[in-house]
Amino acid sequence: MKKRKRDDENQRKRLDVRAKQRMDRGRKRKMEEKEKTGKKILMPEVFISNYNKQQRNYVKYRREKTRLTRSAPKEEGLPYNVAPFEQIKPNTLILAVRVKESNNVAPQGQKILNLYGLKEVNNAVFLHSTPEIIRSILMIQNYITFGYPTKALVNDLIRRRGHLKKEDKRMPITDNNLIEELLGASTDSGVICIEDIIESVAHTDAHFEKVRSVLWPIQLHPLREDSTKAVTKHDATGADIKKRNTKVIKGGYLGLMGDKINDFVKPLI
């Protein structure tokens, strides 16, 4: 009986080892196939989870849309009847920055982000706060931060990080001839140099929309902490561990920042 029991235990161990080897071979084969095709192989549970997240985000989108519809001003030019931290000044220049990434955004919200050029994290665009744009910004405020930039910040962004869009290609602003080619003929006053672009954006004049359509979305540097803000304690010894240029995973702040957007964006240029 003891020998039979011992043999049974050994047999179970051998079966467990063989099953584990088969699983390892299967995982290895899938990894090799994934490397060959260059595509990620996802399990059905991942698709179900992503679909459920997208549906939850869509419900939030519908609630936000209903809330904004009820709080819409009865007369044009008046602010939305929303919380003070959501009050956006009408007819003002706005700098919007994408700070949060989500693969499960509701299709309607993703459409607004793509329309304004906020497809990726750290993308920044200039917008004019018309009633339609204010409504759209409030719909996607869970993924962006926005505020009122100064003329000095506009100048730095366009000169140091600005690019133009020509035939769906990203062109650096190094030649005024390119600006005159894209904007000089279409604007009556003749936007023919980078100074004219900065003036048009900073004052949101009659040529702002045309200039904005030609500007490529600005790509900012990722937000990083310096060594003094990124000091952590070792779990075992309690000693200080200093990290340099630690990348912030969360991205930054969300929603309306007002004039503080200048201090937030300036280190990212």
Image (cartoon, helix red, strand yellow):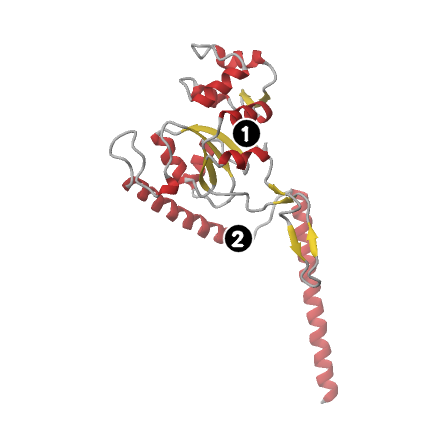
Question: Could you tell whether 177 is left or right of 83 in the image?
Answer: right
Task: Quickly name the residue at label 2.
Answer: 46
User: Going 71% across and 74% down the picture, which residue do you hit?
Assistant: 13
Q: Does residue 149 appear in this view?
A: yes
Rounded to the nearest angstrom, the CA distance separating label 2 from label 1 is 33 Å
Q: Residue furthest bottom?
A: 1
User: Going 68% across and 65% down the picture, which residue do you hit?
Assistant: 20
Where is residue 96 shown, x and y percent of the image?
Answer: 47, 34
Q: How many marks?
A: 2
Q: Residue furthest left?
A: 74
User: Going 71% across and 67% down the picture, which residue do you hit?
Assistant: 18
Quadrant of the drawing holding the N terminus: bottom right
Q: Return the residue nearer the eye: 28 or 215.
A: 215
Number of the front mark, 2 or 1? 1
Question: Could you tell whether 88 is left or right of 159 in the image?
Answer: left
Q: Return the residue nearer the eye: 21 or 130.
A: 130
Quadrant of the drawing holding the C terminus: top right
Where is residue 254 shown, x and y percent of the image?
Answer: 47, 43
SS of the residue at dot 2?
helix
Q: Residue furthest right?
A: 3
Question: Could you tell whether 45 is left or right of 128 in the image?
Answer: right
Q: Amino acid at mark 1?
A: Ile
Q: Earlier in the sequence, mark 2 or mark 1?
A: 2
SS of the residue at dot 1?
strand
Task: Quickly name the residue at label 1.
Answer: 218
Q: In the rendered image of this protein, does residue 103 appear above or below residue 201?
A: below
Within 10 Å of disc 2 (Cα), the crowding (few <14, some 14-19, many 20+) is few
Q: Amino acid at mark 2?
A: Val
